[in-house]
Amino acid sequence: MKESYYRYNSVLYSESRIYIFETEYVILSHTPKGVWIEEYPGKKRFVLKNAKKKFACATQKEALESFRARKRRQIKILEHQLKIAKAALEAKPGESFIYFLGEK
């Protein structure tokens, strides 16, 4: 039986359809610190076993947790960018504005 690592990603098909899919990566070799996987034919990638953020995970459960953590981080980044864009809209042309990271 082949050993694998897993990763979940999402694709937006339309405004109302998002598809979450799992990718299985074959382990090419083990090292004391991690594994080499085949990301796609001819492209190897190293994954640290004990890293907090990993490209792929040893179990499907860990991969799903990693996917959710990536999406939570994406939401925080996009919310921050939205706050900056809204503040910029309120600023007067030619003037700088002060933007506070905290809540108003």
Image (spheres, grey):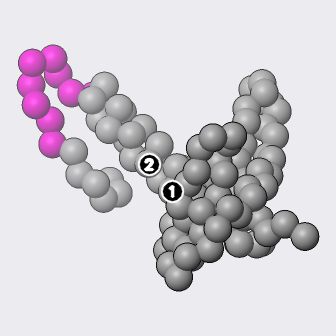
Q: What residue type is labelled 1?
A: Arg
Disc sitting over residue 77 in the figure = 2
> Which secondary structure, mark 1?
helix
Q: Where is residue 76 in the image (x, y as percent from the top left)?
A: 47, 53
For the record, the magenta segment spans: 90-98
Check disc 2 and report its element: helix, strand or loop: helix
Image vertical order of residue 35 relative to residue 24, above or below? below
Residue shown at 77% from the left, 65% from the top:
4
**Residue at 52% from the left image edge and 71% from the top image edge:** 48
The residue furthest right is: 1
Q: Which amino acid does label 2 sit on?
A: Ile
> Separation of disc 1 and disc 2 at Cα?
6 Å
Residue 70: % across, % down = 57, 57
Residue 46: where, in percent of width, then height?
Answer: 53, 61
Image-quadrant location for residue 86:
top left
- Work out whether residue 97 can be spotted: yes
The answer to which of 64 and 5 lies nearer the viewer is 5
The answer to which image quadrant residue 47 occupies is bottom right
Depth order, front residue of 92/8: 8
Quick one: label 1, few (<14), some, or many (20+) residues within 10 Å?
few
Front position in the image: 85 or 3: 3
- Which of 3 and 21 lies nearest the eye of the viewer? 3
Q: How many labels does the image show?
A: 2
Instruction: Say the numbered circle drawn on residue 13.
Output: none
**Tag 1 and tag 2, C-beta contact below 8 Å:** yes
Q: What x and y, as percent, mark residue 26?
A: 75, 58
Is the magenta region chiefly helix, strand or loop? loop
Residue at the spot of label 1: 73
Mark 2 burial class by Cα count in 10 Å: few <14, some 14-19, many 20+: few
**From the viewer's perspective, is residue 100 above or below residue 87?**
below
Residue at 23 percent of width and 51 percent of height: 100
Q: Give the answer, above or below, for where 59 lies relative to 86.
A: below
